Amino acid sequence: MTHHPISSPKLHHYVPQFHLRRFTDDTGRLWTWEKQADRIFPTAPGRIAAATQFYRLTQYEADGHDPLTMQKQLSNLEGEVALISGQWLERLEDMATLDVVPIPRINRGIFALYLAVQFLRTADTRGVLSALIEAGRGTPVNERELREAHDLTWDQRLIGPLAKRFRRSIWIFARNDSTTPLITSDNPIAFSTDDNRQWLRAGILSRQTYLVYPLSPRVVLYCHPRHDKFRKLGKFADCLSPVRSTRRWSIARIAARCSWHHDSSFRTVVGSTPSERSRRRSAPTSTRIGLQRRLGRRTVYDA
């Protein structure tokens, strides 16, 4: 039996729409900065960070199983996480420094699972898998094979340890009370080194890193492992941090294709206006190379 559910969307998001909507402007537009082309344009959350049938598992279709099982499970998880994080954001609006955000055990488990899944489900991860497979066998990977390989990102043997690590971490919320909103991207899960000097895409492999996830333009969640120098942060577990969030570059630095921010000028992301960037494109090659080292050849969104 072949499954063709009428109501199932063909466009699958690898960054949830509920997350993207939190970074739109007052009119519901999501401003996009495409790094490689250095162009800015508005779009809608439903039209970005997505691909046609991205999570369709064709390897199960021939045996009569629903090929959209992964997509449906992701959708259910996103629904729960949207409610949980929405409650946090409502509470944090009026909370004082060091107030504790109540997090029931079941909610912590759900959100930790979401962090693990989101880290692995992106288009960037699929690109890495494609490169590894191609390097191993010496021939290009087609779209069907890539979808089948991406099934690994839903494997409990891989997801379980990551979710456990995040669940056991020290969770600290930080509120951005400045006039510069936070940003997000197609790699919304970032890792920072313990000295706060470097952002790493694969930072999860190091003991000296902590997770950073922007919940909205005003609130960010930090997940610190309970070891080494991070252990002393245990007294702030589940609290609103006494330190104001000021690190605006986090997600822009590790974006694969796109990032989103709350200011269409993107001055807070690149430190310049579009016209200034236009002049910079005509600058000497040595100047442009310096900029590329700072930003990478990728893409960012702004609200």
Image (spheres, rainbow, N blue to C red):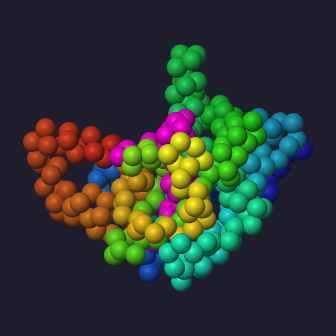
Residue under the point 68% across and 71% down: 102
Left or right: residue 291 versus residue 176 is left
Could you say where residue 86 lies in the image, as x and y percent from the top left?
62, 73
Left or right: residue 27 versus residue 33 is right
Total numbered circles: 0
Residue under the point 66% across and 33% down: 149
Could you say where residue 287 lies in the image, as x and y percent from the top left?
14, 43
> The N terminus is located in which quarter?
top right
Residue under the point 56% across and 63% down: 236
Q: Nearer the viewer, residue 67 or 85?
A: 85
Q: Which residues are magenta?
A: 197-224
Q: Is residue 255 visible?
A: yes
Q: Residue furthest left?
A: 284
> The C terminus is located in which quarter?
bottom left
Could you say where residue 59 lies in the image, as x and y percent from the top left?
77, 35
Q: Decide whether residue 150 is among the magenta residues.
A: no
Q: Nearer the viewer, residue 197 or 290?
A: 197
Residue under the point 78% across and 62% down: 106
Q: Decide whether residue 198 is among the magenta residues.
A: yes
Q: Is residue 55 visible?
A: no
Q: Residue furthest bottom?
A: 94
Could you say where residue 72 lies in the image, as x and y percent from the top left?
75, 55
Query: Does 87 sit above or below residue 70?
Result: below
